Structure formats: structure tokens, C-alpha cells
Image (cartoon, helix red, strand yellow):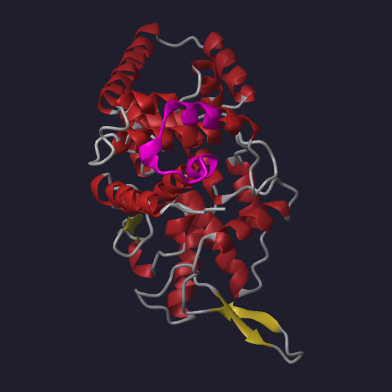
Amino acid sequence: MTKHNPENERIKRAYRQHLKAARGLADASIDVATAAIHRFEASIDFRSFKKFHVEQAIAFRRRLDDAVSAREGKPLSKSTILQTLNALRAFFLWLAEQPGYRSRIRYSDAEYFRLSEKETRVAKATTSRPVPTPEQIEAVLQRIPCGTVLARRNRALIAFTWLTGVRDGALVSLKLKHVDLDRQLVDQDPREVNTKNSKQMRTSFFGVPGSAKQIVTDWISELVRDHLWGNDDPLFPATRVEVGPDQQFRAAGIARARWGSAAPVQKIFKQSFEAIGLPGFNPHSIRHALALLGEKKCNNAEEFKAWSQNLGHESVLTTLSSYGAISEERQFEIIREIADRAGDGAQTAVLARKVAELLSREMRNTDVLKDAYS
């Protein structure tokens, strides 16, 4: 059976180039679009896109409800189906403008790649993510054994993430020169650091409670003093592996090289939290913890905007909608605090108005509908 169509491959190549060069999408987003298009091609036995008709889209949409994830062996989630259809709708809108396809595909044809309004609401519904508390993070930092350089590296890795909110992809590419302890800054230069969407970010240390700042300071001092690390050496080096007396590979300290991916970082987080009886939190959960901490510590809209920007968010809406989910227990606690508060009602009204104005500006400057891959 045919597994590809040369004509389709040529137009798909042009579309990938469009996504990369014209829209500036990251490789991960382009991979999502490519996978969605391939899934649709397979459903039509790799016929030419020039022979498209809306019945194909309708049938494909029905098949998605019965499709199973190859990785998990479970039915596709509504969010995955929505992401697939969004990617296909964007592709067919672009295809309708291309020579050789304009007479065969109409803009309205792309509208058949949609979920119903009800299904879309289900797909976009947020689920509660487990987020570590500041007390749990500090407990991990205090209980990690520090007898070896690898243990101290792992502890510093968690402390640095809590102190700065840097994503795991950037963590593995940071060098000593990117951290300024005197100014308490991290310079995430996209020319050397693997930042999200290659965005330039300068991050100040967050005012987190506990020992994180001291642990990071001690770790950098150890690298420079004991291991003779220079500015271009990795902040969190990979594990050096050697062959032991039993002819088996074993960990033998740190290497003057970086990790190739963020997978070891995720493993360190999971094992460190599980070692003290907590859920295996991932590095990204620390960013959620920082967002929640910001909601408690920030006293006005300007402070929360600065906190949000320090997380690398251009819009406070991202921090509030994607990172700022409040647990039910905290929700009830806040409502009780508000009910018992004997504060100045006029002052509260002014603050509420400032927050509303800030959110209004953000919403005017943000068009979430433009991003088909969000």
C-alpha cells in the first residue's frame, strides 16, 4: 500500500518552510503540524490534496473519536484531537492560496476541521496539576545527601530552578558566565542557551524562602574553586562515566561537558522528590509553584506584571490562566480570609480596578486565536 504521495510531499515541504521562515514556529510546533497532516493523508490513502472534498474531512473527524494513541494505547484525548484539527485547518487555509490548489480548495473547506463548541470547551478545560509547596521544595533541598559532587550538583539543580524558574531545556545549556551572583541575574542568551522559541530572557532571582540561594552560591563557588571551572564551562555538567574494576560502567564525578537533553534533569527531579515520599514532581512544576508564590507575595498589579515577566511571560494572562491555578483548599481559604477582612474597602476597590485595567490591556494585545498550535 502507498505510504506517501510525491506531489503531497512537495507541497508539505513548502508548508514546513512557510511555518519556519514566515511564521517563525519552533521545530516542535512544525512537527505537530506535520504529524497531523500525515494522519489525514493516511486516512485518505495518500491521495493527492488536489482531490480533496469535504466528505474526507467529515470522515476523518469521525475516525479521530475512535483513534488510539500509539504511545499510550488509549483513545486520543479531546485536547489532542483539537490540536490535530487546528493544525489541519491552518494547513488547508494556506493550501487554498497556493497555485494549483486555489481552484480545488476553498477557504470554507478548512472549517470542516473543527470540533463542536461543546467538545472544544471539554478539550480546553484545564486539569489540576500537582504543584509542590515551598515547604516541600525546601524539604528536598535539606534532605538530599551532599557527600558526593553528583549529589551536590543535583541539589543545586533543584535549588537553581526554584530560585530562577528557568526551564529544563535552558538549564542544561547554561554556562557559568550566564549567572551573575552579584546582581542576582541569569542571562538566557538564545545564541548559547536553549530558551523557549529562542527568546532573549534576563531573569532576576525570585525571592523564594529557604536555602536555595545559598545552595546555588556554594555550588558555583565549588565549581570555580575545586574543579577549576571557567566561564564557558557548564553550570550543571553531565555525569562522567568510567569503567570500574569489575569492568562495569559507573558514575565517577562530573564531566566538563553539558547534557545532550533535559531527560537527566527530569529524572533527577522525579527521584529526589520520590526519595522523601513526595510525588515525582517534574521541573516545570516548579514554575507553577513560582506562579502561585507570586500571587501571594505581589501586592499590586505592577508587582505581579514584573513577576510574570520574570517567568518569561509576555502576558500576565499566561501566568494567570496556565500557571496560576489555585487549589480548592487554597480557594476556600482565600474566600474565608476575604469574608473576615476588615480592611479599607476603597483601597481594595482601587487595587481591583488596577488589576482589571492591566488585564484589559493584556487582552487587547493578545490574540490567542491566531495560534493554531497553542
On the image, the x and y values in percent for residue 84 come to 48, 37
Q: For this view, does 249 lie left or right of residue 353?
A: right
On the image, the x and y values in percent for residue 126 come to 55, 28
User: At 36% across and 51% down in the image, what residue appears?
Assistant: 7
**Quadrant for the C terminus in the image:** top left
User: At 55% across and 44% down in the image, what residue appears?
Assistant: 285
- How many discs mark residues in the rendered view? 0
Q: Is residue 158 above or below residue 52?
A: below
Residue with the most extreme bottom position: 245
User: At 28% across and 18% down in the image, what residue appears?
Assistant: 357
* Residue 374 visible to an observer of this rendering: no
- Residue 307 location, quadrant: top left
User: At 31% across and 23% down in the image, what residue appears?
Assistant: 363
Q: Which residues are magenta?
A: 39-61
Q: Is residue 101 above or below residue 152?
A: above
On the image, the x and y values in percent for residue 132 come to 61, 41
Which residue occupies the foreground of this view, 60 or 173? 60
Q: Is residue 202 above or below residue 265?
A: above
Residue 118 lies in magenta, yes or no? no
* Residue 15 visible to an observer of this rendering: yes
Q: Main secondary structure of the magenta part?
A: helix
Residue 47 lies in magenta, yes or no? yes
Q: For this view, does 36 lie left or right of residue 101?
A: right
On the image, the x and y values in percent for residue 138 come to 60, 49
Which residue occupies the foreground of this view, 360 or 20? 20
